[in-house]
Image: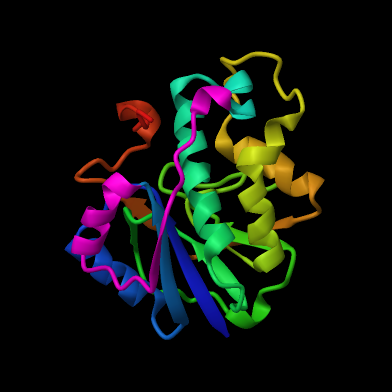
Amino acid sequence: MKFAVLYAGPYRGNDTILQNHKLAFGDIDVDVYVSCFKHYLDEWVASGWDVKEYFITPDVDFNETNWKKYRNDAAGQSGFWQFWNLKNVIDFVPKKYDYYIKSRNDIVFNHSFTFDINELKPNTIYSPAESFHRKDWDENNWINDEFYIGCENTIKIVSSFVTNFYEQNRHGTNTSHASNESQLRIWLRENNIDVKKIYNFPYTKNHNGVTIPSGYVGFQLEKI
């Protein structure tokens, strides 16, 4: 099988994490793609990451988006930029791969990828049972959005989340406490995508020394 690994947004890794990701994917045949705003591109290129192709994320006025109507708090804005970058790499990556892996570039995997890729099924999203901030999660109401695997159709539905999910009234307020993980889970259900956990694939986070969720230390928001 052939896989595309998708990274999006600002570069948050380092040489140690770069090597860690190479070892984690092991013998899986992967090509790496990145989408980021233009002002982050030089840092990505200088990182030494083996990227097959870069895409420049288009500018957007957050205040003109449907997302802003319902999730205008810091967590909501951070989520928008996360999925806006991700949408671009998903939309432009070549559609010639069997499966697509979305990952963060500040994740540190505890060991190599041991999941049997022959068990992968279409219209299903696979994500580790342990995230770096939640040891277990209810797959009926939540999705680990830090790392996941899906077929082309699955990843296209994830891509449409940022533009289509809030076309309808979801919360009735722009200070909602809804999370990316819970709302993406709703979107996947509405589009008939199953959610499955990958067991025995733990990892941690190291964003320039920060190892705890952004909600505890502050969200990185764009100024465009």
**Residue at left 46%, top 49%?**
131
- In this rendered view, identify the residue nearer to me: 200 or 95: 95
User: Does the magenta-highlighted stretch encompass residue 53?
Assistant: yes
- For the C terminus, the quadrant is top left
Q: Quadrant of the N terminus?
A: bottom right
Residue pictured at 44% horizontal, 49% vertical: 57
Tell me: residue 2, above or below residue 24.
Answer: below
Camera sees residue 142: no
Identified at 37% across, 30% down, the residue is 221
Whether residue 128 is visible, yes or no, is: yes
Q: Position of residue 65 (x, y in %)?
A: 59, 28
| Rendered location of residue 100, percent (x, y) | 56, 68
Number of numbered discs on residues: 0
Q: Position of residue 112 (x, y in %)?
A: 39, 74
| Residue 132 drawn in magenta | no
Q: Which residues are magenta?
A: 38-64
Is the residue 114 above or below the residue 107 in the image? Answer: below
> Residue 167 vs residue 220: left or right?
right
- In this rendered view, identify the residue nearer to me: 28 or 38: 38
Residue nearer the viewer, 123 or 94:
94
**Hey, which quadrant is residue 178 in on the image?**
top right
Please tell me which residue is depicted at 62% across the width and 19% down the height of the picture. Answer: 69
Which quarter of the picture shows residue 215? top left
Residue 61: x and y in percent read 49, 29
Image: 67 above or below 11 = above
**Scheme of image coloration:** rainbow
